[in-house]
């Protein structure tokens, strides 16, 4: 872990030193490099945009970069071109790419070779909690050391943010927040919708993306309903990160409820979260933790019946399929004190009932499955945060890039 931190600092500094050179390299407009979440997984909007291009726009050479060799091997088996980010080929193609598509920043690919390319940042969530430059650590009740660390991260973020050519979003509402958070000119923030949300609709290219996970589970259980629990990440270690037993997560009670409803509860913690759930009967459990086994929840999202979440912006994407949402802001007071302030009043933008503990979660699940009282509120928030609701975001992103190329000629 210490080695990894020093390596990250080293390549960050090297990127700054070499950027005057990499910016002068002649790049190829038909080579596009993709990556997401610090090079960990094949997921998010860069994944779906790349799949779309390979299916519909074969004239574009698409290359996925990752720090995970298993991902490289898996993608090659599926017919995709992929390399490790800091291999020679990873560096070479980053240096030659005309466009680089990421979900957090250029550290998703190869930070050394990226300066000089057109960086398209899809971002990874419509922000309801403050992000990037708006996430002022001085507003939080944390230690002096934590504030110093946060300032360094902010400095690194600002360096990466300055490389951005275009930033994608879903609405005027989001555009305003991203313009502020990234300290970027608003004409570089484009309302296209996000390619990952295309999977929530049915069209020619999304039909090739199956859901093997649920298919296998349905062989094991009689499943009529799928409940998803997808909480957000806690930056701070001051508050309790136990979102289960502290709030009355009684395994046997929940198992009984799930069996009575022919349902499963799928848990996926944020990819940076180290929270572990100790289940007593894992082999036959209807409580299934996929935090370490599934990196991309979007194919499952479409097949689920209810979403349970706290401050994760994934619920705003879930609005596109118009199914009930149970909100679980168990630790709201702690969260805004130690982790992140919010852009909004929480109750104003969360169209669903609120639970204080797991007992209330399952009481509310039974209620909303019988009477869905929140359809109108969901529609209002959906229209506020999504300009497009058609499953054609990948094509809009492609056309935005094509128009950018034309404007340069």
Image: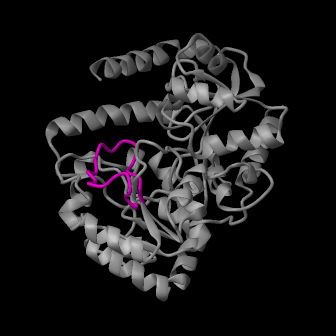
Which quarter of the picture shows residue 349?
Answer: bottom left
Q: With 164 as the anchor, is 207 left or right in this view?
A: right
Q: Is residue 215 left or right of residue 228?
A: right
Name the residue at 71% across, 54% down: 393
Q: For this rendering, which residue is in front, 313 or 340? A: 313
Q: Position of residue 273 (x, y in %)?
A: 33, 45
Q: Nearer the viewer, residue 353 or 286?
A: 286
Of the 4 image quadrants, the one containing the C terminus is top right
Left or right, residue 42 beside residue 347: right
In the image, the segment drawn in magenta is 266-286
- Residue 56 % position (x, y): 82, 43
In this orientation, which residue lies closer to the viewer: 36 or 358?
358
* Image vertical order of residue 403 relative to residue 337, above or below: above
- Rendered position, 253 above or below 120: below
Q: Can residue 327 be seen in the rendering of this structure? A: yes
- Magenta-span inclusion, residue 268: yes
Q: Residue at x 73, y 52 (%)?
A: 206
Q: Main secondary structure of the magenta part?
A: loop
Where is the N terminus found, in terms of image quarters? Answer: top left
Q: Is residue 328 in view from this perspective?
A: no
Foreground residue, 397 or 354?
A: 354
Q: Position of residue 363 (x, y in %)?
A: 34, 81
State the residue at coordinates (64%, 61%): 200
């Amino acid at each position: 872990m210490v080695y990894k931190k020093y390596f990250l600092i080293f390549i960050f500094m090297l990127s700054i030193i070499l950027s005057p050179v990499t910016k002068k390299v002649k790049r190829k407009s038909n080579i596009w490099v993709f990556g997401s979440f610090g090079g960990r997984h094949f997921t998010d909007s860069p994944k779906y945009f790349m799949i779309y291009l390979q299916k519909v726009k074969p004239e574009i050479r698409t290359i996925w970069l990752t720090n995970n060799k298993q991902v490289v091997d898996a993608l090659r088996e599926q017919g995709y071109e992929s390399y490790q980010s800091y291999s020679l080929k990873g560096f070479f193609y980053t240096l030659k790419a005309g466009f680089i598509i990421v979900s957090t920043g250029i550290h998703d690919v190869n930070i050394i070779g990226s300066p000089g390319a057109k960086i398209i940042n899809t971002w990874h969530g419509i922000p309801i909690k403050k992000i990037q430059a708006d996430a002022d650590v001085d507003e939080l009740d944390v230690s002096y050391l934590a504030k110093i660390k946060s300032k360094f991260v902010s400095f690194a973020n600002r360096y990466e943010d300055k490389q951005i050519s275009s930033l994608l979003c879903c609405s005027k509402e989001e555009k305003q927040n991203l313009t502020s958070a990234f300290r970027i000119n608003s004409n570089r923030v484009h309302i296209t919708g996000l390619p990952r949300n295309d999977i929530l609709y049915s069209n020619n290219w999304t039909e090739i993306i199956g859901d093997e996970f649920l298919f296998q589970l349905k062989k094991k259980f009689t499943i009529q309903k799928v409940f998803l629990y997808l909480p957000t990440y806690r930056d701070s270690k001051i508050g309790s990160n136990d979102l289960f037993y502290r709030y009355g997560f009684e395994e046997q009670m929940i198992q009984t409820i799930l069996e009575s409803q022919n349902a499963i509860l799928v848990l996926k913690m944020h990819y940076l979260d180290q929270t572990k759930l100790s289940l007593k009967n894992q082999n036959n459990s209807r409580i299934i933790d996929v935090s370490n086994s599934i990196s991309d929840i979007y194919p499952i999202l479409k097949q689920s019946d209810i979403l349970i979440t706290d401050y994760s912006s994934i619920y705003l994407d879930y609005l596109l399929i118009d199914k009930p949402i149970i909100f679980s802001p168990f630790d709201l007071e702690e969260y805004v004190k130690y982790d992140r302030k919010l852009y909004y009043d929480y109750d104003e933008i969360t169209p669903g009932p609120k639970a204080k503990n797991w007992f209330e979660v399952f009481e509310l699940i039974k209620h909303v499955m019988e009477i869905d009282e929140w359809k109108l509120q969901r529609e209002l928030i959906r229209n506020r945060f999504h300009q497009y609701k058609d499953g054609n975001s990948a094509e809009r992103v492609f056309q935005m890039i094509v128009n950018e190329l034309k404007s340069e000629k």
